[in-house]
Amino acid sequence: MSLPKKNTALVDYDSRTGEISVPDMYSIARIIGLCPVSVCYKRTRRGWHVAVTFLERFTDVELIAIQAILGDDPMRGALNFMRYWESKGKKVPKFWRDRSNILYRRKL
């Protein structure tokens, strides 16, 4: 597990959702006015984990939207948004704030 950065979208592609090619990813990012500076793919048991780094920094909800646009696993996106929505206006400890949008190596 690596902690997320405010300029990196973490996308989980399962075999049922299908991956987006790097050229398609750049095209989609360009449509919304962004330009990735790096894309890193890592094979998982059920698909791929992809880290897309941008020059810009984003808020939590902006990252959730960007990840959804890039085809993130819908359940992961829903859970990330739920964590964001539930924490609005509340003082969330930094430990949990830093872990609100991560990709896991395996499920327990």
Image (cartoon, grey):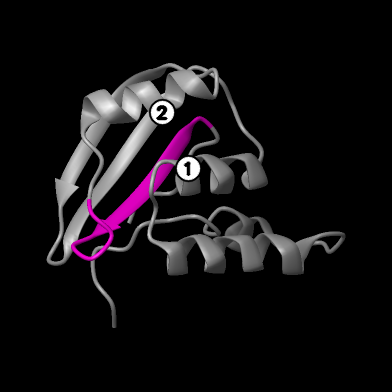
Q: Residue tagged by mark 1?
A: 69
First along the sequence among labels 1 and 2: 2
Q: Where does residue 99 sit, x and y in percent of width and height?
A: 52, 58
Q: Residue tagged by mark 2?
A: 28
Q: Dot 1 lies on which element?
A: helix
Q: Where does residue 36 sit, x and y in percent of width and height?
A: 39, 21
Q: Where does residue 65 sit, x and y in percent of width and height?
A: 57, 45
Q: Is residue 86 left or right of residue 78?
A: right
In what quadrant of the picture does the C terminus appear? bottom left
| Residue for point 55% across, 35% down | 6
Tally the numbered discs: 2
Q: Which residues are magenta?
A: 7-18
Of all residues shown, which one is farthest toward the bottom? 108
* Residue type, mark 2 in image: Ile
Q: Is residue 37 above or below residue 66?
A: above
Q: Is residue 74 magenta?
A: no
* Residue type, mark 1 in image: Ile
Q: Where does residue 19 sit, x and y in percent of width and height?
A: 23, 47
Q: Is residue 88 above or below residue 82?
A: above
Q: Few, some or many C-alpha atoms within 10 Å of disc 2 (few <14, some 14-19, many ≥20)?
A: some
Depth order, front residue of 97/22: 22
Q: Dot 2 lies on which element?
A: helix
| Residue for point 45% across, 18% down | 30
In what quadrant of the picture does the N terminus appear? bottom left
Residue 3 in view here: yes
Q: Is residue 71 left or right of residue 105?
A: right
| Residue for point 49% across, 17% down | 55
Q: Is residue 4 left or right of residue 47?
A: right
The CA distance from mark 1 to mark 2 is 8 Å
Asked if the residue at tag 2 contacts the one at tag 1, i.e. Cβ–Cβ closer than 8 Å, the answer is yes
